[in-house]
Amino acid sequence: MTRPTEDLATPTSIGYRAGGGGGLPLSVWPTAQQTARVQRAGRYLPESTAHPAKMLPAIARHAIAAYTQPGELVVDPMCGIGTTLVEAAHLGRYAIGVEYEPRWAELARANLAHASGQGAPGGGRVLHGDARRLTSLLNPDLVGRVALVLTSPPYGSSVHGQAKAEPGRGVAKWHDRYGSDPTNLAHASLPALLAAMGEILAECGAVLRPGGLVVLTARPWRRRELLVDFPGALAGVAEHAGLVAFERNVALLVGLRDQRLVPRPSFFQLDLVRKARARGLPLRIIAHEDVLVLRRPHPVAPAARTPSGQPGSPDGQSASERGAAPPLHRDRTGPRGSGRRDQG
Ligand SMILES: C[S@@+](CC[C@H](N)C(=O)[O-])C[C@H]1O[C@@H](n2cnc3c(N)ncnc32)[C@H](O)[C@@H]1O
């Protein structure tokens, strides 16, 4: 049995927590039919391998195709080597990335140029800076016009990087740090990281157009064999920042081969689970990434206020917007009636 290692001290989350997901739609995205290496081959510059925690290209592709239309604007406030930007460009979207470490910002620019050289119909820009100041980094004309924010938060070096077990010599690790700057959020304690994520998500809400979406991909991890429910804590922080739960999905880190599921866990996962099992603890491998989808609420129209002056809907939508369909499902076709297309 797994249980959280610690009280993550996050605000109560109505949409995600009530009833184990609050009745939100859930779907499973088959994003690891190919390994990460195969997904990146030729599409990203080889130097990209050095980044310790890249998003799977298929996750980015799936989210962008499902929630935006060609020509729309996508932002990744912690863009690393630019997976969101590259996939957006290939899908004919325009993307802006922010990255704290100059090294990765430069590589994200180079990956975008590479995509453009391969004929990607969209494009993008990379800004070097702190995601906590996203609104001041973006061109003011773009604030409030972003269709989708897609990002994955930084974790500490215990859960990622490149590693190899060498018989008799232990584990060799490399590329397990984003950089040496101690103010990079990857070096923050869990409570500090969550607090910073609150600031970043409030900024994301501000750059989105009303009804625009934030997609966060995050993995739970284990500390001393106990589960740290980072995605759950992140969901609470996001709702506290004013975003509204929209969907909770699972990106499957599993391939299907000859009708068998082939898990693609990280080295760290495998190592921990093997050691725990050797001690008789029947841990299971985590073979998914949580994909939290949140929405910037529409402004509350005066007509939607109750006689007491309170908004008439918990997600801030007006009575006329609620229309015939039930609340959380009313705009299932997407912010502009775009419809969902699975291209992962
Ligand atoms: C999980 S990685 C994102 C990887 C990215 N999705 C990709 O595929 O390359 C998180 C990134 O956040 C960056 N980061 C950390 N603190 C930041 C901050 N305050 N503002 C912007 N980026 C930050 C890290 O340097 C790291 O590259």
Image (cartoon, grey):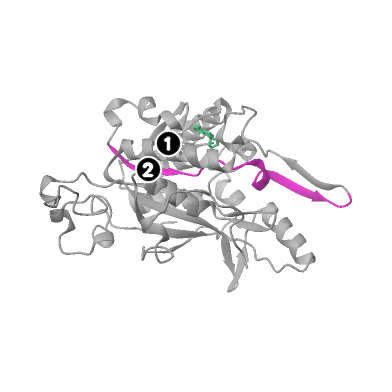
What residue is shown with label 1? 199
Q: Is residue 59 visible?
A: yes
Does the magenta run of residues contain 215? no
SS assignment at label 2: loop
Residue at image position (37%, 63%) is 22
37 lies left or right of 113: right
Picture coordinates of residue 81, whole percent (x, y): 54, 36
> How far is disc 1 from disc 2 in space, using C-alphas?
7 Å
Residue picked out by circle 2: 241
Specify the quadrant of the image occupied by residue 190: top right
Label 1 close to label 2 by CB (< 8 Å): yes
The amino acid on which the numbered mark 1 sits, given as a three-letter code, is Glu
Question: Which quadrant, please, contains the C terminus?
Answer: bottom left
Image: 46 above or below 262: above
User: Is residue 166 located in the magenta-colored stretch of the structure?
Assistant: yes
Magenta residues? Answer: 145-168
Q: Is residue 127 above or below residue 39?
A: above
Q: Is residue 234 above or below residue 112?
A: below
Whole-percent x and y of residue 243? 34, 47
* Residue 58 in sight here: no
The secondary structure type at the circle numbered 1 is helix
Q: Nearer the viewer, residue 35 or 292?
A: 292
Q: Quadrant of residue 206?
A: top left
Q: Earlier in the sequence, mark 1 or mark 2?
A: 1
The image shows a total of numbered marks equal to: 2
Amino acid type assigned to the residue bearing label 2 in the image? Ala
> Which residue is at 52% across, 29% downward?
100
Question: In the image, what residue occupies the spot 24% across and 57% down?
Answer: 331
Residue placed most toward the observer, 190 or 83: 190
